[in-house]
Amino acid sequence: MNLDKCPNCGKALKGFFSTVDLIPESKTEFINKHLELNFEAYCTSCSVEHLNKLAQSFQQQKNEIETRLKQIIHHIPILSSPAPNDWKYDAIEMVSAQTTSGTGFATELSRSFNDFFGGTSNTTNKKIINATNHCKSDLRIQCVKMGGNAVISTDIDFNEIGSGSTNMLMVCMAGTAIKVRDINMFNSKNREYILEVIELTEKLDAIAEMPK
């Protein structure tokens, strides 16, 4: 978009004395949608009032937004393989997440007995599952905040740090955030949830950016 003035407030965007620029298109769409406006763009000056107004409104719903996001965030696809051949997409950036949790003496004892008698340690397995899910959620949120809607070529590593009662389990995950150009490539159910995740994330971003 090549404009000399902000379509909303009319401030100059170019020139030696200009200190404003246009905000990203996604934020323009966000303002227009929630304030029922229809401007082509907003600048870094006039958008502040609009974004603060929205943030104050969303602040009252913050707990509900976070709860709902936790419920549906898993609908953002995470694949260990490259993207399917029928996906036309733009690669955005690498995303990564790490988490550590203690195993402790009780877990070590449980795992030792189970290993010895041919069973599995439920305590250890639960810690691994929880840590893995935490990393997946982190990757998904990073992806959406970058403007993406899927993560591909994802790799996961498990490491144990320390020894005895001070053991720590580390889970590391990394992948590539992408934006699939045609949202219809996802099935109808996932498509609805993905769009909702994007909207909820934008609301939380607006709250986070509100001046303290």
Image (spheres, grey):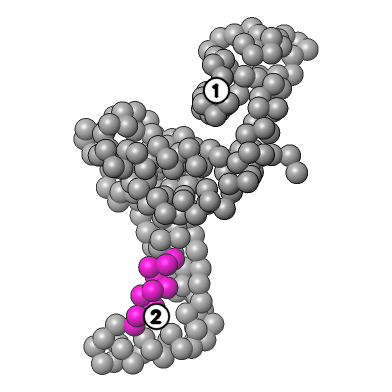
User: Disc 2 designates what residue?
Assistant: 123
Residue sitting at 47 percent across and 79 percent down? 103
Q: Would you say the magenta stretch is mainly helix, strand or loop?
A: helix
Q: Secondary structure at mark 2?
A: helix
Disc tally is: 2
Residue sitting at 33 percent across and 92 percent down? 113
Residue nearest the observer in this picture, 132 or 46: 46
Q: Residues within 10 Å of mark 2 (few under 14, many from 20)?
A: some
- Which residues are drawn in magenta? 121-131
Question: Between marks 2 and 1, how big is the CA–CA gap?
Answer: 51 Å
Q: Secondary structure at mark 1?
A: loop
Q: Looking at the picture, which amino acid does disc 1 mark?
A: Glu
Q: Which disc is residue 36 wearing?
A: 1
Quarter in which the C terminus is drawn:
top right
Q: Is residue 96 visible?
A: no
Q: Residues within 10 Å of mark 1 (few under 14, many from 20)?
A: few
Q: Looking at the picture, which amino acid does disc 2 mark?
A: Thr
Residue 58 appears in which quarter of the rendering? top right
Tag 2 and tag 1, C-beta contact below 8 Å: no
